[in-house]
Image (cartoon, rainbow, N blue to C red):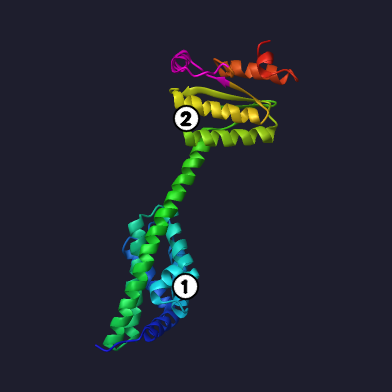
C-alpha cells in the first residue's frame, strides 16, 4: 500500500466539496428523508439550507491550517454549523441518535462523490478514512450538543411553566397577590420571590398577599420557604399577608413549632384583601395595626 499524504487527501476532499457541493447536498437531503431522520416539522428547503451550510463549513475547515483530527471541534464555522444543526433538531424534538445518524449519513453522500473523482485505490482509501474520522467526530459533537441543548430547552420550558403556575395578580391599588397551588419547593420559591419582588417594584405595591389555599400540605421546608419570601417582601418595604391557612394546615404548623406570629395571616383570600385595603388606606400605620382596626 502506497502512503498518501494528508495534504493530498485534503486537496481531494476540498476539491470534491467545491466542485460537487450541490450534488452532495442533494444526496444528503435525499438520504435523510429516506432514512426517516426528519419528520414533517422540517421542510426539504430547510434541509437543503442546513446541508449547504454544513458542507461549506466542512470545506472551510479542511482549507484551514488545523490538523484533520481537530477540524470539527476547533474550526469556528464548522463547529457553529454542527451546533446549529443539532439545536434545530433538539427544538424539533428529534431523537439524539437520529440527529447523529443524520450527520453520519453525510459520509455516504460525500463518499459517493469522492468515488467518482478519485480513481487510485490507495488515495480513495486514505480519503475514505479521513471522511470517517471527520464525520464520526461531527456525529459525536452533534450528540453532545443536542443533549446539552435539549436539557436547556427543557429547563427553560419548565421555568416558563412554573412562572405561569405562580402568577402575580394586582387585586387592588398597591395590593398584589400570588395564589400558590401544588408543591412549594426551593426552585419554585425562588421563581415566586423573583416575580413578586419585581412586581412590587413595578406596581409600587404596599401589600403582597401570598395565598396558600391550593398548597396541599405544609411542612418545615414549605414554612421556611414562605418565611424567606415574606422577609424579602419586607426588605422591599411592603407588608405581607398569608391567606388560605386551613385548620389542618394551622394544626400542622403549630405541631411543627413554626413561629408565624410576626406574619399577618387570614383564613381566606377575601379576608386578606380586606386587611390589605385597610393597610393601604392607613398611611403611616403599620400593617398589624391597620389590620387590627
Figure check: 14 above or below 134 = below
Nearer to me, 116 or 206: 206
Q: Is residue 222 left or right of residue 276?
A: left
Q: Is residue 245 magenta?
A: yes
Between the C-alphas of marks 1 and 2, the distance is 48 Å
Q: Residue 241's x, y, as percent?
A: 60, 21
Task: Name the disc covering residue 184, or none.
Answer: 2
Q: Is residue 108 left or right of residue 153?
A: left
Q: Residue 67's x, y, as percent?
A: 41, 77
Q: Mark 1 = which residue?
A: 57
Q: Is residue 175 left or right of residue 157?
A: right
Q: Residues within 10 Å of mark 2 (few under 14, many from 20)?
A: many
Residue drawn at point x = 45 percent, y = 76 percent:
66
Residue drawn at point x = 32 percent, y = 65 percent:
34
Residue drawn at point x = 38 percent, y = 84 percent:
12
Please tell me whether mark 1 sits on a helix, a strand or a loop. Answer: helix
Q: Is residue 42 magenta?
A: no
Question: What range of the chain is rendered magenta?
Answer: 242-261
Indicate which disc, 1 or 2, sits on the residue closer to the N terminus: 1
- Work out which quarter of the rendered image holds the C terminus and state it: top right
Residue drawn at point x = 48 percent, y = 34 percent:
186
Amino acid at each position: 500500500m502506497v502512503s498518501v499524504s494528508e495534504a493530498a487527501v485534503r486537496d481531494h476532499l476540498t476539491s470534491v466539496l467545491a466542485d460537487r457541493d450541490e450534488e452532495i447536498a442533494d444526496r444528503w437531503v435525499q438520504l435523510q428523508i429516506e432514512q426517516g431522520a426528519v419528520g414533517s416539522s422540517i421542510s426539504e428547503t430547510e434541509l437543503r439550507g442546513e446541508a449547504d451550510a454544513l458542507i461549506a463549513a466542512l470545506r472551510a475547515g479542511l482549507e484551514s491550517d488545523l490538523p484533520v483530527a481537530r477540524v470539527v471541534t476547533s474550526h469556528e464555522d464548522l463547529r457553529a454549523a454542527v451546533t446549529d444543526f443539532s439545536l434545530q433538531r433538539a427544538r424539533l424534538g428529534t431523537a439524539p441518535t437520529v440527529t447523529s445518524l443524520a450527520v453520519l449519513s453525510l459520509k455516504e453522500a460525500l463518499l459517493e462523490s469522492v468515488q467518482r473523482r478519485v480513481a487510485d485505490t490507495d488515495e480513495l482509501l486514505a480519503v475514505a478514512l479521513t471522511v470517517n474520522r471527520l464525520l464520526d467526530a461531527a456525529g459525536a459533537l452533534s450528540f453532545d450538543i443536542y443533549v446539552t441543548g435539549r436539557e436547556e430547552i427543557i429547563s427553560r420550558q419548565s421555568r416558563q411553566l412554573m412562572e405561569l403556575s405562580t402568577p402575580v395578580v394586582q387585586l387592588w391599588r398597591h395590593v398584589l397577590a400570588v395564589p400558590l397551588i401544588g408543591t412549594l419547593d426551593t426552585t419554585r420559591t425562588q421563581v415566586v420571590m423573583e416575580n413578586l419582588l419585581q412586581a412590587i417594584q413595578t406596581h409600587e405595591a404596599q401589600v403582597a398577599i401570598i395565598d396558600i389555599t391550593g398548597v396541599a400540605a405544609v411542612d418545615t421546608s414549605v414554612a421556611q420557604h414562605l418565611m424567606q419570601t415574606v422577609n424579602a417582601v419586607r426588605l422591599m418595604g411592603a407588608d405581607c399577608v398569608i391567606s388560605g391557612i386551613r385548620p389542618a394546615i394551622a394544626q400542622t404548623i403549630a405541631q411543627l413549632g413554626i413561629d408565624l406570629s410576626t406574619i399577618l395571616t387570614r383564613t381566606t383570600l377575601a379576608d386578606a384583601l380586606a386587611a390589605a385595603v385597610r393597610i393601604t388606606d392607613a398611611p403611616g400605620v403599620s400593617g398589624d395595626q391597620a389590620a387590627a382596626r
